[in-house]
Image (tube, rainbow, N blue to C red):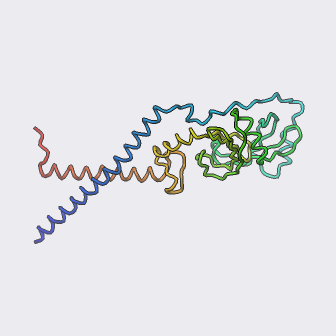
Amino acid sequence: MKKINKHKSKLFKLSTVKSLHKWLSLLVFIQLFIWLGTGLFFNLMDHNKARGNHNKQTVVTQQIDSQRLLNSNSIIAKSNTQVSEVVLVQRLGQPYYLLTHDKGLYSHFKSDYSLVDAYAGTELVVDSNVASRLAQASYKGSGDISGVVKLEPPIADMLKEKNTVWQVNFSDDLETSVYVDASSGRLVGHSNEDKRFVDFFFMLHFMDYPFLGEGSVGGFNNGQITFFALLTLAFCLTGFIWVIELLRKGRYKFN
């Protein structure tokens, strides 16, 4: 009786392994099919359109009168917040000192800046008006500004961006949006319908689904990938157990 129960238990376990292996094979196949399809799309797509820079132009810079520049040390002394770095930059053709209060490892990491006029010493606040002018300076299309919105991350068009930005929308055929950093006035980038279409396939390829976990991260570094890796590992292990059982029963013959 004990032998019969033991035999039934083994059959039940093997049946469970087989069933699990079959369902896991379906899930793994679906994601592999998506990877193959999106990978093919990435090879065939127009890479220039994918960047969303169809209406982007180089921002014109002006010559700086070095004799009029204020001493950066005096600017730091007047700042109410600790300054770790000062860089001379141009915004709208005028020189400004970019004061770094908190700097991330990369430009899209969370940072804190302020801008001070390098001639007059007055602070430039990047409000909707300034953001519109900065966006217009980088835009070469024929559309007019249709709206300006201040956004907090996560930002659908710029998933890696961790800073507060101004979204300046233009009424052109591609529905161009220009993004400007709200503290530094840095041009974050352009986006349009072409880029958004490609971003959808990147979402599928990276398994970067916004409705799961903490939302999209703009890459492979997400919980969905980790979960799928565990499923794939389970798929391999159940298959290995099945093969061992078939070998034990002599189902494989090597002539």
Residue 157 at x, y percent in the picture? 60, 45
Q: Quadrant of residue 192?
A: top right
154 w.r.t. 107: above or below:
below
Q: Residue at x 75, y 39 (%)?
A: 134
Query: Which part of the image, by quadrant, shows the C terminus?
Result: top left
Q: Nearer the viewer, residue 210 or 12?
A: 210
Q: Foreground: 17 or 171?
A: 171
Q: Residue at x 66, y 33 (%)?
A: 56
Residue most extreme to the bottom: 1
In-image side of 170 versus 88 (left or right): left
Picture coordinates of residue 88, whole percent (x, y): 78, 36
Does residue 104 lie above or below 56 as drawn?
A: below
Q: Of 42 and 13, which appears nearest the observer?
A: 42
Task: Tell me residue 193's x, y (percent).
Answer: 58, 40
Quarter of the figure with residue 139: top right
Placement of 4 over or under 53, stated as above or below: below
Can residue 88 be spotted in the picture?
A: no
Q: Can you give x and y, in whole percent of width and height, for residue 69 in the image? A: 87, 34
Left/right placement of residue 2 relative to residue 27 reads left
Looking at the figure, which quarter contains the N terminus? bottom left
Viewer-closest of 216 and 81? 216
Number of numbered discs = 0
Q: Residue furthest top?
A: 63
> What residue is at 21 percent from the left and 49 percent from the top?
243
Q: Is residue 121 visible?
A: yes
